[in-house]
């Protein structure tokens, strides 16, 4: 289904009664960001139901077939977000013209197709967010979020703490204006030191360029936080999915609800009825007692001894002996 109606509708409003804009659909499918998806459309690489898409104001409805470069694209999955501890020496692109190893070539098997939220340069390491939803990636990169990016930087040179404090007012270097930066000295040993640097803009190589302007050479740079997401104790090279509850709370996404457990179900039942239902009165259901040996009478669940006509079909257990008589 195609059409130009509602092309100017802002994000967050329904695209069309007939479906979703194809660029946004491709972004949610993890093919590319919305902007890059529009480039693919302009290059004639996107087709809808066998016909080349000519305008971004084209809508995809349920059951439509979309191809990119002649290859079918699966419908978008639920939005997923991952924390990844990027090692140094990897580039944050899907393909590198210089043939260097990429982050996506080093990810464990079994993950969906992912794109990065922002980038870390070749020699930087630490927290990198990955998602299967291009629209979410773009949303998390917006400067309007004003999220703090926090780094630990190992530097070589003489640290001037007053100069670090001055970064809180912002600084302009070679015509490029950088916003306020919070930087503090953590430790120092000789001409080497560790700094904590926090900023909100995250321009290209911002930490390295600003510290270099202060006469410091960055020898190691680790991102430890991106907004509410923390690197924590995630091992280098490991990837971990962000749980649905955290995504709902921090991003307002309609992520699948967390599975409720027995304690929560019991609490809800008490609120409705004022008492525990019979099924949840015990924290752990009782088990029927097991026979000590194969010749004992079988017992029904919850300890009921077999009685009546059915008892004749059960093996007879050993007779209990009375107390031994003294010899």
Image (cartoon, helix red, strand yellow):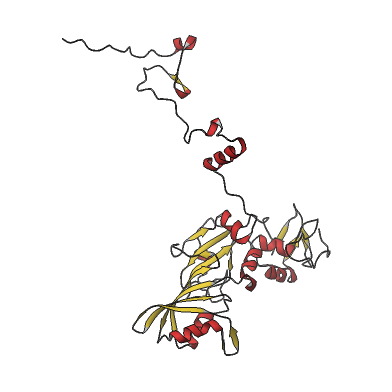
Q: In the rendered view, does 133 fall on the left or right side of 216?
A: right
Q: Position of residue 212 (x, y in %)?
A: 48, 86
Q: In the rendered view, does 309 fall on the left or right side of 268?
A: left
Residue 142 visible here: yes
Q: Position of residue 8 (x, y in %)?
A: 80, 68
Q: Residue furthest front?
A: 274
The answer to whether residue 49 is above or below residue 139 is above
Quadrant location of the C terminus in the rendered image: top left
Q: Position of residue 271 (x, y in %)?
A: 59, 40
Q: Residue furthest bottom?
A: 174
Q: Nearer the viewer, residue 43 or 75?
A: 75
Residue for point 27% across, 11% down: 322
**Tag count in the figure?**
0
Q: Nearer the viewer, residue 215 or 269?
A: 269
The answer to whether residue 1 is above or below residue 119 is above
Image quadrant where residue 250 sits: bottom right
Residue 49 visible here: no
Image quadrant where residue 188 sits: bottom left
């Amino acid at each position: 289904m195609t059409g130009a109606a509602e092309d100017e509708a802002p994000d967050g409003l329904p695209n069309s009664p007939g479906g979703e804009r194809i660029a946004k659909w491709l972004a949610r499918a993890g093919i590319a960001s919305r902007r890059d998806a529009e480039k693919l459309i302009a290059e004639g690489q996107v087709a809808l139901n066998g016909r080349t898409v000519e305008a971004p104001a084209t809508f995809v409805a349920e059951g439509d077939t979309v191809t990119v470069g002649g290859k079918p694209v699966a419908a978008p999955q639920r939005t997923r977000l991952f924390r990844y501890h990027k090692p140094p020496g990897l580039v944050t692109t899907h393909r590198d013209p210089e043939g260097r190893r990429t982050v996506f070539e080093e990810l464990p098997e079994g993950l969906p197709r992912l794109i990065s939220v922002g980038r870390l340069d070749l020699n930087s390491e630490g927290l990198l967010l990955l998602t299967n939803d291009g629209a979410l990636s773009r949303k998390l990169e917006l400067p309007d979020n004003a999220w703090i990016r926090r780094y630990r930087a190992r530097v070589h040179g003489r640290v001037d703490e007053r100069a670090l404090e001055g970064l809180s007012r912002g600084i302009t270097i070679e015509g490029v204006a950088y916003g306020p930066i919070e930087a503090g000295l953590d430790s120092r040993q000789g001409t080497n030191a560790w700094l904590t640097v926090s900023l909100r803009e995250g321009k290209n190589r911002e930490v390295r360029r600003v510290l270099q302007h202060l006469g410091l050479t960055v020898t190691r740079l680790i991102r430890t936080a991106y907004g509410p997401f923390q690197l924590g104790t995630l091992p280098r090279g490991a990837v971990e999915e962000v749980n649905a509850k955290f995504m709902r709370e921090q991003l307002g996404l309609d992520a699948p609800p967390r599975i409720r457990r027995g304690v929560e179900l019991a609490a809800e039942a008490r609120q409705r009825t004022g008492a525990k239902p019979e099924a949840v009165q015990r924290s752990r259901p009782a088990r029927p007692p097991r026979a000590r040996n194969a010749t004992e009478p079988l017992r029904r669940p919850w300890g009921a001894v077999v009685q009546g006509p059915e008892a004749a079909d059960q093996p007879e257990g050993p007779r209990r002996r009375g107390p031994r008589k003294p010899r």
